Amino acid sequence: MKDARAACVMDYHARSKHALDRYAAGPGTLDWDAQPAAFRYWAGCTQTALPRDVVVDDIAWGALGATRAALPFDTRTLGSFLRLSLGLTAWKEYAGSRWSLRAHPSSGNLHPTESWLITSQVADVADGLHHYQNLQHALERRAWNEEASAPGVWLGFTSIHWREAWKYGERAFRYCQLDMGHVLAAVSYAAALHGWQPRLLALDEHKVARTLGVDRDADFANVEAEEAEVIVALHADGDAPTTWQHYAGTPGLLDPKPLYQWPVINEVSAATRGTPPATPAATQTVATHANESDIRATQVILKRRSAQAFDGESVMPQSLFKRMLAGLLAGGSPVWNLWPHTPRVHPVLLVHRVEGVAPGVYVLPRCDASIEPLRAAMRDSFNWQRADESLPLYQLIAARAGKTARTLSCHQDIATHCAVTFMMVAEFAAPIEQDPAAYRHLHWEAGMLGHIVTLEAEAAGWRGTGIGCFFDDADHEVLGFKDTQFQVIYHYAVGMALDDARILTLPAYA
Ligand SMILES: Cc1cc2nc3c(=O)[nH]c(=O)nc-3n(C[C@H](O)[C@H](O)[C@H](O)COP(=O)(O)O)c2cc1C
C-alpha cells in the first residue's frame, strides 16, 4: 500500500517535470477572464471584522530573534498577526487590471492556500472555527460547539488545487506545496514578532480535514474541493478541538466553467496524505542570530514583493550573502523553531555577482551528514573547495553560470539578471519510500528556504523571486545526479530589483 503510494508519487514527479523539449501537461489555452476567483466567500456565516493595526511596529529586523514576552490573544493581536502572515499587503493596478498581493508570495499570484483560525476563550472572538477572509481582513464563523473547550488559538490550512491547476496543469500540485512552505514561514516570522511559539500538530489527514470541516463532501458538492494540509498551534500546549456540533455557511464557487481536468493531481494528493512532522513540544525557542539591521521588521514583511526583473549588474554585498545563508541554517530564522527537523533540502547556488565570492556553482549542505551523500551523487569533477570559514559553503566549480541559470529556469531572465540563483536540492527517493507524505513536506521545506532568503534580501533593500518553472532533469544533468536519490524541487533568484513605475500601488485595506 505504502509502496503503491510511493510509486504514485515518483510517477507524478516524473511526469510533472519540465524538460528542454517538453513542458509538463498544462492547459493549451488560458482564458484570463475566466480565472478562478482569488477569494473564497462563505455565504451564510457571521462575519467579524478584525482590527487592522499592526501592534508590533517597533521591532527592528535585526532584533527579530530576541526572545520577547508573548502578547495576549485578543482581536487586536490576532488582527495584527494575520495581517503580517496571511493578509493582503497591497493592491496593484495597471492598464485596467487590478490585483492584490499578500504577505507571502504565491506561484502565479494564484494563492491556493486557504487559512482557518480556531479560537477558544479569546476575548471578543466567538469560539469555534473561522475562515480567514483576507480580502476584508475578517473572520467568517464556520463551526462551533456549545461547550467551551480549553483556551487556545490554532491556525489551519487547506489548498484549493484548482486555483493553480487552472494555469499550470499537472505541475500545479508542486506549486501548492511550495506555497504552503512560504505560508508556514510567514506564520513563523509574524508569530515571533508577537512572542508566540507556533507548533505543527501531529494530526493525520482525517483529523485535519474534520477539524477544518473540509471533509463535509455535501458542502463541497458543486464547488472546488479543499485539501487538508496542517494545523498549527500558536502556543506551547493544549489540544485543538477536532469536532463540531454546529456548522454554518456554504463555500463559494471559484470557477463556473473549468475547461480542463488534471486527475493526476487528485491521485498524488491522495498518495501524499499523512501526518506532518510535528514540532516537538519540548523544542526550546532558539534565539536567532542578531544583526545590525534597524529597518522595522513589519516594514520588511509588509513591503516584501517578488522582483519581476533584476538589473543584471548590481553586486550583492557579502554581508547580505552571508546573512541569507546563515538564515538557512539551524538557529538562523524563527522558521526553524516551527520546523526543527534534520534538514533534507540543501541549496546549490549559482553565484553571478557577489562581493568577494568568485562566480561559480556552490553548495550549502545544511547538515554534516548530508555532505558525503551529496558529494557521492554529484559530478566527480566538482572541487568541493571550502569557500567560507563560518558557513558550510563549498565551491563546486568556478564558472560564469548566468546563461546556464537562465536556460535551466525555463529561459527566464530573472535567473541570470539576479546576483544569485538558488537550486533547492531535496533528499528525495528515500524519504518518499519511507513516507509518501514527505513529498509535501520536502516542498514545504523548500518554500521555507525561499521565504527566508527573500525576507533577508528585502531587509537589505534587495529582492527575491521564486522560480517554480525549471527544467528538472537538465538541473540534474548539470549537478551529475543519475537517479532520484536527490532532486531539485525549487529555484529562487535574488538580486537588485527593477521596479516597473507604470504599476500603481494602492493600500491593502482602504
Ligand atoms: C512557488 C512559487 C513559484 C514561482 N515561480 C515563478 C516563476 O517561475 N517566475 C516568476 O517570474 N515568478 C515566480 N514566482 C513569483 C510569483 O509570481 C509572485 O510571488 C506572485 O506574482 C505574487 O507577487 P508577490 O510575491 O510580489 O506578492 C513564484 C512564486 C512562488 C511562491
Image: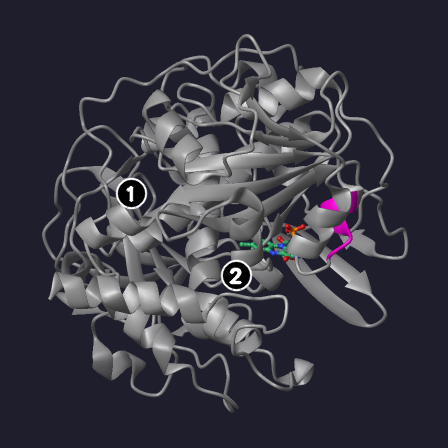
Residue matched to label 2? 111
What residue appears at the point 66 percent right and 15 percent down from the top-left corner? 293
Quadrant in which residue 324 is drawn: top right
Magenta includes 283?
no
In this view, the residue in front, 233 or 363, is 363
Which mark is on residue 170?
none
Colour scheme in use: one colour
**Residue farthest along the right direction in this orientation:** 502
**Residue farthest along the front direction in this orientation:** 381
In this view, the residue in front, 88 or 111, is 111
Which comes sooner in the sequence, label 2 or label 1? 2
- Horizontal side of 477 relative to 365 (left or right) equals right
The answer to whether residue 69 is seen in the rendering is yes
Which amino acid type corresponds to the residue marked 1 in the rendered image? Val
- Horizontal side of 497 relative to 297 (left or right) equals right
Q: Is most of the magenta stretch helix, strand or loop? A: helix
Q: Position of residue 135 (x, y in %)?
A: 55, 60
Quadrant in which residue 319 is drawn: top right
Q: Is residue 217 above or below residue 387?
A: below
The stretch of residues the image draws in magenta is: 412-416
